[in-house]
Image (cartoon, helix red, strand yellow):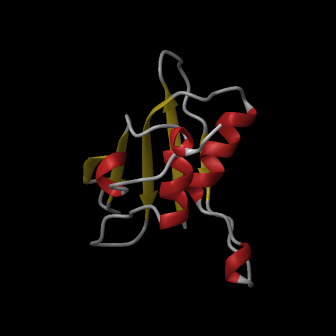
C-alpha cells in the first residue's frame, strides 16, 4: 500500500490519496495521482510539496513516471518527500525527479 498528500501554497490542509490497485494492473491508480486529483476537485491548483509513504521496507518510495508527469503539469517548483517504512525521508525537487521535462508552457497556443 502507498499513500500520498499534497500541500498548496498559502492554503492549509493536506488533501491525501491512496493507491487503488486492480487485478488488471494498468487500471490501478497511484496514490500521487489520487491526491492531486482530489486536491484539484477541491479547488487546489498551486502545489508546493508532496509526501509519499509506503511500507517498502529499506527502500525510499518514489513516484512512477506517469505520476511525475502529472505532478509536472502543475510546475516544477515543489518539494517531494520520499519516505521509508521506518519514517526516514529525503526531499527532492520535482525538477530532480523529472529533468528536462515537458510541460504546459511547451505547448503552442
Where residue 24 sits: x, y (%)? 74, 84
Identify whether 43 is placed above or below 2: above
Identify whether 92 is placed above or below 44: below
Where residue 6 sits: x, y (%)? 51, 38
Residue drawn at the location 74% of the way across and 84% of the way down: 23
Where residue 95 sits: x, y (%)? 33, 47
Q: Viewer-proximal residue, 83 or 93?
A: 93
On-image quarter of the C terminus: top right
Residue drawn at the location 43% of the way across and 56% of the way down: 53
Residue drawn at the location 53% of the way across and 19% of the way down: 12
In the displayed structure, does residue 23 sit left or right of residue 88? right
In the displayed structure, does residue 34 sit left or right of residue 13? right
Identify whether 44 is placed above or below 78: above
Q: Residue furthest bottom?
A: 23
Residue drawn at the location 51% of the way across and 47% of the way down: 71
Q: Viewer-proximal residue, 13 or 30?
A: 30
Q: Viewer-proximal residue, 103 or 48?
A: 103
Q: Viewer-proximal residue, 69 or 108?
A: 108
In the displayed structure, does residue 15 sit left or right of residue 98? right
Asked which quadrant contains residue 29, the reply is bottom right
Amino acid at each position: 500500500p502507498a499513500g500520498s498528500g499534497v500541500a498548496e501554497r498559502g492554503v492549509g490542509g493536506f488533501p491525501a490519496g491512496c493507491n487503488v490497485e486492480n487485478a488488471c494492473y494498468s487500471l490501478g491508480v497511484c496514490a500521487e495521482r489520487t491526491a492531486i486529483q482530489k486536491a484539484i476537485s477541491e479547488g487546489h491548483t498551486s502545489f508546493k510539496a508532496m509526501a509519499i509513504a509506503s511500507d517498502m521496507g529499506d527502500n525510499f518510495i518514489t513516484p512512477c513516471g506517469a505520476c511525475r508527469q502529472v505532478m509536472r503539469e502543475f510546475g516544477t517548483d515543489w518539494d517531494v518527500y520520499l519516505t521509508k517504512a521506518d519514517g526516514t525521508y529525503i526531499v527532492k525537487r520535482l525538477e530532480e525527479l523529472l529533468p528536462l521535462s515537458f510541460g504546459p508552457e511547451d505547448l503552442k497556443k
